[in-house]
Image (cartoon, rainbow, N blue to C red):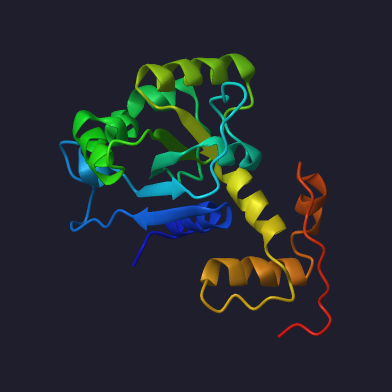
Amino acid sequence: MADSNVRIVREFLEALGFSVLTNRKFQLQKADPPGRYSIDVVATNLRYAEPEAPLPMKLNAEHMRFLPNVIVDVKGWHGHRFVPSLITATPELFYFVSAGALQYARSVFNGAPFKSLLVISEATAVEPLWLKVEEMLKEGGIDHVVEFTTILGFLISYVEVNVNYVESETLQLLRLLKRYDLVKGLQMELPFKSRSSNPEGEE
């Protein structure tokens, strides 16, 4: 069974128009030394648009359309914020951009350009510390990060309460939370417009 964090990320990418391939791992843990199995997801953007300016390191949902192809590593460390000391203590953060992993990605995308995307729990709110984190990640070869708050916020906005998501446990759960106003406060804080919803007549 796929990791729940990876499933959430997959739903996020598919909702944004990516064709997603989960990189199946045929062992209990990611391969060491790093290589192919250090990548959680590879995805191609079917709605790709050329960016007019360089993208920031930390992306929001609106930025995602400017990524052509991506390799993704998902770090669902929900008990931690990303600070420099965490980066220093966890070299496996960079396994998915190791030489072996990148070689696998190039073969999947048949030589087409791609970006590396690290999914993190939450960035530190202290700006100098985050700037240091960005510097360390860039030096290690990681192009972009996206926070779980961004992913979950987008998916909450994306789901409609009058749609029955029978093929997705993740979207169905978010739909129910939204239907019963358990995410109402969060929706008011989202930086993008939530879909209108009408619980009347739902399945």
Spot the residue most to the left. 33
Q: Quadrant of residue 165?
A: bottom right
Instruction: Say whether residue 51 is left or right of residue 113.
Output: right
Tally the numbered discs: 0
Please determine whether, in this image, residue 9 is positioned above or below residue 79. Answer: below
| Rendering coords of residue 77 (x, y %) | 45, 43
Q: Is residue 202 above or below residue 17?
A: below
Residue at x 64% of width, y 26% of height: 125
Depth check: 25 or 192 in front?
192
Determine the residue positioned at 68% across, 72% down. 176
Horizontal side, residue 53 vs residue 84: left or right: right
User: Which one is nearer the viewer's eye here, 158 or 118?
Assistant: 158
Q: Picture coordinates of residue 33 (x, y %)?
A: 15, 36
Residue at image location 50% in from the left, 30% down from the top: 82
**Left or right position of 70 against 123:** left
In the image, residue 175 above or below residue 194? below
Q: Position of residue 10 (x, y in %)?
A: 47, 56
Which residue appears at 66% of the width and 51% of the height? 154
Q: In which image quadrant can residue 127 be found?
A: top right
Quadrant including the C terminus: bottom right
- Would residue 20 be found to the left or right of residue 66 on screen? left
